[in-house]
Amino acid sequence: MRRTRTLTVLLALAAGLLAGPPTALAAEPAPRAALAADSYTWQNARIDGGGFVPGIVFNRTEKDLAYARTDIGGAYRWQESSHTWTPLLDHVGWDDWGHTGVVSVASDSVDPDRVYAAVGTYTNDWDPTNGAVLRSGDRGATWRKTDLPFKLGGNMPGRGMGERLAVDPHDNDVLYLGAPSGHGLWRSTDAGVTWSEVTAFPNPGNYAQDPGDTSGYASDNQGITWVTFDESTGSAGTATRTVYVGVADKENAVYRSTDAGATWERLAGQPTGYLAHKGVLDAENGYLYLAYSDTGGPYDGGKGRLYRYATATGAWTDISPVAEADTYFGFSGLTVDRQHPGTVMATAYSSWWPDTQIFRTTDSGGTWTQAWSYTSYPDRENRYTMDVSSSPWLTWGADPAPPEQTPKLGWMTEALEIDPFDSDRMMYGTGATIYGTENLTNWDSGGKFAIEPMVRGLEETAVNDLVSPPSGAPLLSALGDVGGFRHTSLTEVPSMMYTSPNFTTTTSLDFAEENPDVVVRSGNLDAGPHIAFSTDNGANWFGGTDPSGVSGGGTVAAGADGSRFVWSPQGTGVQYTTGFGTAWQASAGIPAGAIVESDRVDPATFYGFKSGTFYVSTDGGATFTASAATGLPAGDSVRFKALPGGEGDVWLAGGAADGPYGLWHSTDGGRTFAKLPGVDAADTVGFGKAAPDASYQTLFTSAEIGGVRGIFRSTDEGATWTRVNDDAHQWGWTGAAITGDPRVYGRVYVATNGRGVVYGDTAGGDGGTDPGPGPDPTPTGACEVEYTVTNQWSGGFQADVRLTNTGTSAWNGWSLDWAFPSDQRVTQMWNAEHTRTGTTVTAKNVDWNAGVAPGASVSFGFTGSWSGTNAEPSSFALGDRVCGRT
């Protein structure tokens, strides 16, 4: 997990910098070419988690309102009724893919409907766009955006520090944002619409993880790292007078203003030699708690301290739970129990071995206890129990020797929060999930508190490759950080990632088209083989043997009958083998680093592509010949696949804005290619089951067609295209992989870079291998509906619906009916499934939001079409019960 997760093949694909005034994300879209569209339902192939969660934020005035941020996968809102997370940034599109990295989230305690997100993934040239601040008045259902004149780094070193974005608890039009790269402290006085630098702030920071890094990644100044208000120094409607700010400067880490940001001074007497990762204020007792580390994290950190600063007297007290000489980690996760402010918790975020550590004090740091301790080394006693049965892969299939345990308590534990309304609930983020407990105070009474994943709905994997075999499991995935999974069900968490070997990142995946039980994958591993094989459809694996020089997974292809393989690993040239990789031989006629694929009919035919040239082998990969085809993309931002059942039928997608870019088709084994007209740009291509009246398999692509970026489907060999996603479902960058399902017409699996595997089905599709939704739910008890049109343009509109259980019994499933008074139609719905009978629309829960407790609400939204007028429905009903309106 000590890896920098970056996009693969992205620089040539991303668009240029944004320009102009702040953009309203919900604004009326500009006119564009008419495109066919289909109504799809979208959800994730469940993995639950899979990536680093550096921040968790609870609202301080509304119970059960919480948000989580991820480094590359967007932000989420907690849904208390179902104990799930709802994604909030799926609308981020291709050109703004960097805005799926979230450096900070702020929830407004004055107006809990307001939430803000500071977004941007990299501060170096990996991300072509500047950062932005997103603002929402409906808890993240819709957003407006203000572009910033600098970049933000949601996936940069130091991303676990924070929060860098904060709302004034008294004057909620005032916000502060800590910037990286020497850009200083910024402030908004109009609720995030405009921003200006606080020129009086004296120190933009100076710490970089590695000043000599020429890529600009580790050499960037980590800047201003957190902002904390002292709410005891203000009153409603007046800006809080005392504000504390953390700076990435080991000699000058904490500053304070006592005049609402007009002037600033370095806190006198502060410790030096460390960075303050967090600053959390207990206004009731007058203490500012600070967690220090000798580095910025989230991976590194060898020494650390915890300090308490008395805001009234200026006294500093070292309250560290262990002596400095005994630390081999830094402190970061830090939280105060708002019900009992003398209770404070902190994490040893960089204690990789044998485990992370969590510390707790109930006397403001006078004495501490810890989550686990040694009895007689290497044996340890835990104050907690851990149940990961809901995400069983969190054991990693490991069997470590003491003092290590599986599952681990965590690693990279920089997010730690006690629910401000419930002393028993605590959540913390790790490099792979969110863990939580709801009986935390057992810690103090001598019992054990129970930890389990609290991550359902939060999907954060970066997807490198996808395949959907014609038999066996419907989906196999190749993922960053967690390797990948065999998905026997799309709605259940797989029991384990691929093991034997367990790649840290799987880079490529293929199966034998005529023998789908034979599967091959290649990937990255610090020690061990970089290739593995399965003969039971990916259920079990065994490692192959690396040829000399291999340093990374590269791409791999299986012959159609599974008798031979071609591999293009990093570190050496293209290789081929018969059998399961015990003896590799160098392929001739093809350059190192070429992308390789197999013909899906002829087991002796393999294909390759490198730098604008297509290569063909007809002798099992021993020799390749360069094709005479011209006009193909000159770079290596290319994906290509051969059609199942069609010998010599090859589709190639890719290119760059400064050269050929689009979709090409060959029917003669790559000797010639024809570029499809009307496809402006394409980056992936895949195949699925043919439409009922079609003879050719369905094509899917992530592309730009008719000036519109999206996920497209063709049932007539690319002659016409239908967009199957919509502007609410874009998921940033989707250029790594796409595939249809050979068993379910219309189903498509889309690889995202941080939102996991999303899959879509046509409305009314047969559901394939997953169980159907069952009979219509019939909840009982009173209900209330809030219907809001959030955006409207010529011929179209977007609406949000909030359904509240105002009865006394919980619902285990719901189905809401209404009739449109005019010629309105739903074109796309999210967070619910919909059907239409005549003028009646029925919206029904999806599996994760079926449960609604008394007094709780569930929300969903949709886009629709209209003509004439767009009047609201007059009534809504759950079964035979009419709901009240708000």
Image: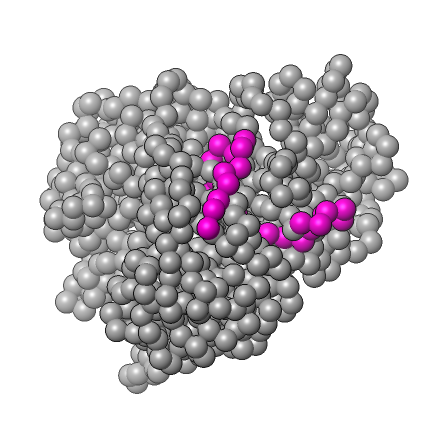
Quarter of the N terminus within the rendering: bottom left
Horizontal relation, residue 102 to residue 63: left or right = left
Q: Looking at the picture, how far across and down is residue 63, in whole percent?
A: 54, 43
The outermost residue toward the right is 880
Q: Nearer the viewer, residue 63 or 626?
A: 626
Q: Quadrant of the C terminus?
A: top right
**Residue at 19 percent of width and 34 percent of height:** 182
Residue in the image at 78% along x and 43% along y: 815
875 vs 505: above or below: above
Magenta segment main secondary structure: loop
- 230 versus 407 height, above or below: above
As rendered, which of 848 and 511 lies closer to the eye? 511
Q: Which residues are magenta?
A: 671-696
Q: Is residue 855 above or below residue 873?
A: below
Q: Residue furthest bottom?
A: 376
Residue 481: x and y, percent?
39, 60
Residue positioned 47% across, 38% down in the render: 662
Is 691 covered by the magenta stretch?
A: yes
Q: Residue at x 44, y 55 (%)?
A: 464
Q: Looking at the image, what colour scheme do you see?
A: one colour
The reply to whether the magenta stretch includes residue 353 is no
Between 166 and 495, the one lying in front of the other is: 495
